[in-house]
Amino acid sequence: MFGKRKTMAAGLAGSMLLAGMLAGCGASSSNGGNGGGEAAGGGNANGGGKKVTLNVWGMGDEAKSLPAMAKKFEEQNPNIDVKIQAIPWSSAHDKLLTAVASKKGPDVLQMGTTWMPEFGAAGALMDLTPYIDQYPDLKDDNFFPGSLETTKLDGKILGVPWYIDTRVLYYRTDLLASVGYKEAPKTWDELSDAAQKLAKRGKGKYGISIDAKEQTLSFMFARQNGAKLLDDQGKPQFNDPKFVEAVKYLNSFYQNGSAPKEDLGLDPVQAFKGDAIIPMFISGPWMVKPITEQAPELNGKWATAVLPKKENNISNLGGSNWSVFQYTEQKDAALKFIDFMSKPDMQIEWMKLADAMPAAKAAWDDPALKSNPYLSVFGQQMNDAEPMPLIKQWEEIAQSYLSTFEKIYRGGEDVQKALDDFNKKAEETLSK
């Protein structure tokens, strides 16, 4: 579970239901539109001096830190009262479905990047294109190209990058050195070799955590092996030899005992500290702070590194965007809010609060980021990071893959056969 910050348990049923729910409410009267309000940039959010309330949905544990950001916004915008609702990722998808179907929900919402295609295609997110020029901090050239990819659909701008993350290797420098690695493994072969040597330290010790519930992990390794997930016509390539080889490689960690098959029930820091039951794991920037704070005795004994490579070392590019709900009645206040949150200095504030990497490129020049040896590695990895395919069916495909992978690593099913079946199922999903 080390690789997961958020459990975007979208729920396949939820995905399937969205179109039907929208169809069912299509005949209802619409009072939403974009609401009233004066031109963007006016002194009052509603143009008349009356105080308005802006409802913001934040997702996951990090959303609990949003009120501090909202307070700064309110100080600069006294006519806007921000109400933050922190929603667990595990229930966020269903809650969004309900909001879309009823046309009643937040004004601004945090969207996981993988959800953008689904809710964008459903018309749940306001097209920001007409307003970008009025808000300088929302312009494209402020953000990394990869993160911008996640905000656009069918020529529309449906959000702005909020924070970005990618995955790197966390490792215990002292224990790696004890098995002959003075630096982090740089290749697939070295990673496997180091993990097996570390697992031989004794019973109950492992070399690395391979999070079988992390839906991007296998796709990320497949890309490192030169595999395409979808071809140029959008057809799945999950039984391609390069994809199969990557899955066999990941499965080998379980089969040779260098990675645990079962969830050990340990906090990641617990497993990393002391003698380190698990001295290597792949995860995002959110793990830096817990290790630093909860295991200060490890200072000088651990590090982060860019991922080992095969043909390349592409990591996953994820994160969250801010979107404006299509049915908001506080359009101007909503645009002001996402513009405020996109400012580089505010993104640095958010990084300090939530350990979330800034999406604004200018924020990376801040000393707080440049001088941190753990976090600066994420900046290096972002040069080789790509989002998952931005198609509305991806969530369903990725969830389905987890079941396939479990049949392989736990059930011992033939890798090629399992991936042939998975590829066929993916073809059916994409043809819907």
Image (cartoon, rainbow, N blue to C red):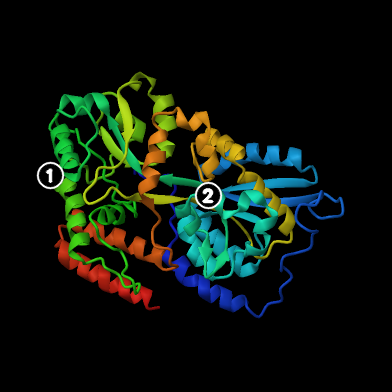
Residue 56 horizontal side relative to residue 267, left or right: right
* Callout 2 secondary element: loop
Q: Residues within 10 Å of mark 1 (few under 14, many from 20)?
A: few
Residue 44 horizontal side relative to residue 284, left or right: right
Mark 2 or 1 closer to N-term?
2
Q: Residues within 10 Å of mark 2 (few under 14, many from 20)?
A: many
**Residue 360 visible, this orientation:** yes
User: For the point 70% across and 55% down, which residue is it?
Assistant: 134
Q: Identity of the amino acid at label 2?
A: Phe
Looking at the rendered image, the quarter that the N terminus falls into is top left
Mark 2–mark 1 distance (CA, rounded to whole Å)? 42 Å
- At which x and y percent is residue 25? 62, 76
User: For the point 53% across and 49% down, which residue is it?
Assistant: 143
- At which x and y percent is residue 74? 73, 41
Residue furthest to the bottom in view is 27
User: Residue 13 sits in which quadrant?
Assistant: bottom left
User: For the point 50% across and 61% down, which residue is it?
Assistant: 116
* Callout 1 secondary element: loop
| Foreground pick, 333 / 344 | 344
Residue furthest to the front in view is 141
Q: Which residue is mark 1?
A: 256
Q: Which residue is mark 2?
A: 143
Query: In front of the other: label 2 or label 1?
Result: 2
Judge whether 131 appears above or below 192 on screen. Answer: below
Residue 275 horizontal side relative to residue 36, left or right: left
